[in-house]
Amino acid sequence: MRTIQGVSVSAGIAIGTVRVLAAVDYAVERRLIDDPQAEMDRFRAARDTAVAQLKQLRDNVAAEFGENKAELFDAHRLMLQDPDYAECVEGLIAQDKVNAEFAVKSVAEQFAAMFAAMDSSTMQARAADVKDVSRRVMNVLQGKRDSTAQDGSVQGDAVQNGIVQNGIAQNGESHIIFAEDLAPSDTAQLDRAKVLGLVTAKGSANSHTAILARTMGLPAITGIGDAFDPADDGHVAVIDGTSGAVFVDPDEATLTEYRRRKAEAEEHLSLLRKLKGKPTETKSGQRVHLYANISRPSDAAAVLANDAEGIGLFRSEFLYLEREDWPTEEFQFDAYGQVAQEMGDRPVIIRTLDIGADKQVDYFNLSHEDNPALGYRAIRICLTRPEIFKVQLRALLRASAYGNIAIMLPMITSVQEVRDAKRILEEAKSELRGERIDFNESIQIGVMIETPASVIMADELAAEVDFFSIGTNDLTQYTLACDRQNPSLERFADPHSPAVLRMIQMTIEAAHRHGIWCGICGELGADLSLTDTFLRLGIDELSVSPTSVLPLRNVIRNH
């Protein structure tokens, strides 16, 4: 057994035979031409054909996966129609008197290098996109027909090892595809009935190829690098899209374990098929929004895979915890924007940094505290170190132009804290307006209700914000005066305590009095023994771990 560690980009388990797709050689001969104008006309005609092909591909993807996933190919069409792109190609043809194929390839490499040099990983991933669209133009120029005609037939010379170059099996057998890389348009044309999973040597979690793999529900791993070996063709492999592990020629123990895990996943998938797209609604018609909690941008894949209606808690502090230095505005914008784009129209509620207490970061240089749970943490750091807070707020605002983002403030104990935070937010908005940077002017602001003070002040707080989200972990800790990090207090820290449940009731009632919605994003939200209680109290939203979404929906729909 050979074990390879790659980067997980789409969760799931696949067990099957490997088919290796050899890298396609896009070598283009440089030829001198006599008539530059005729060559430019040839390029324009090829570009128009490629745009028409992308329109067909866009319509196919929209029909199967929804309009928001088809937007990628609208972006590809815009790339081809970009005046800068065309001017560069035509300028090279005119200046150097070279053939259109060579000019297109040269410009593609130039643009790809420019994207790859950018600080933003999202922009770096666009390098693959510009190569993809340029390859399509080169194919037209070279007389290669598009591999997916409107009638769905396979064309051209792409078949190798019984598989079309874009990964569609021709011999009726399903395979795990190993490749140097896959272009977004190739991935979009995969036949999910014939492809079990994907493993590539190159690529990233931010690429459109990775996003499409997640949308299609294909386990996918990228970044295996030099471990990619064409000799693996025909061997049995197991891929774990959650951990990023690849096992070639797995031993019996590994096979048995992964068959067990796959069976459990398929049982969960059966529940997904039964409940996917169904409203989270009781038999009496009471509607509850069912969201998911995440800690990292890559977790958005699990949110979509488990059919949550949105993200109710994005713990942004993990962007700080997993670094050795301050995350820049660009780094944070990249992370928030990636999730916003991937989630489409679904809400993405991002909690501002909740550092302190049990979440310590060396470069914050926080002083030692005898009782950190009651100390310098979360909103208190943000309000006393606004230079840190504003960087995050600017990133959140910029990302709001790309999706349905809302901002949530943690550890609130007073109305003044909310007003101070909103003042800094307005400063960030004013700066972005001055810089002519787009953002959602009406971005929603909410607060976490996780202290007794915020419950007592809920009526006043509700007048300041758009929503409440109850953090039951801290609310239990502060209501019962039990440090949740102290295992000896476990018997006393009862989250089912009538005191905690009454706090939740008071919060919901205050929210509804003022016309805002109230949710729960703590662990109690997934406690099925309390679902009936929460429904009776009139909860509007529950945000739980992605794997808890479907079991909770099932209970609510049977209530």
Image (cartoon, grey):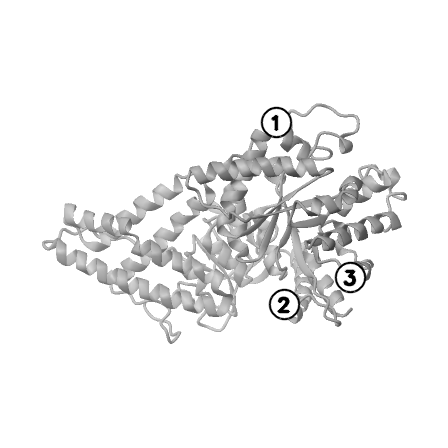
Tell me residue 348's x, y (percent).
59, 51
Q: Earlier in the sequence, mark 1 or mark 3?
A: 1
Which element type, helix, strand or loop, lies under badge 3?
Answer: helix
Q: CA distance from mark 3 to mark 2?
A: 21 Å
Tell me residue 173's x, y (percent).
51, 70
| Quadrant of the rendering where the C terminus is positioned | bottom right
Tell me residue 36's x, y (percent).
13, 53
- Name the residue at 44% across, 59% down: 71
Q: Amino acid at mark 2?
A: Lys
Nearer the viewer's eye, disc 3 or disc 2? Answer: 3
Q: Amino acid at mark 3?
A: Leu
Instruction: List the residue tagged with mark 3.
Output: 535
**476 shown above or below 554:** above
Instruction: List the residue tagged with mark 2.
Output: 276
- Structural crowding at the residue carrying mark 3, measured as other residues with C-alpha within 10 Å and reported as few (<14), some (14–19) or many (≥20): some
- Name the residue at 43% across, 69% down: 60
- Structural crowding at the residue carrying mark 1, measured as other residues with C-alpha within 10 Å and reported as few (<14), some (14–19) or many (≥20): few
Instruction: List the residue tagged with mark 1.
Output: 363
Tell me residue 412's x, y (percent).
71, 39
**385 shown above or below 352:** above
Q: CA distance from mark 2 to mark 1?
A: 43 Å
- Structural crowding at the residue carrying mark 2, measured as other residues with C-alpha within 10 Å and reported as few (<14), some (14–19) or many (≥20): some
State the residue in front, 272 or 556: 556
- Furthest-bottom residue in view? 151
* Label at residue 424: none
Which element type, helix, strand or loop, lies under badge 1?
Answer: helix
Residue 116 visible in this rendered orientation of the protein: yes
Determine whether, in the image, residue 94 is placed left or right of residue 255. Answer: left
Q: Amino acid at mark 1?
A: Tyr
Which element type, helix, strand or loop, lies under badge 2?
Answer: loop
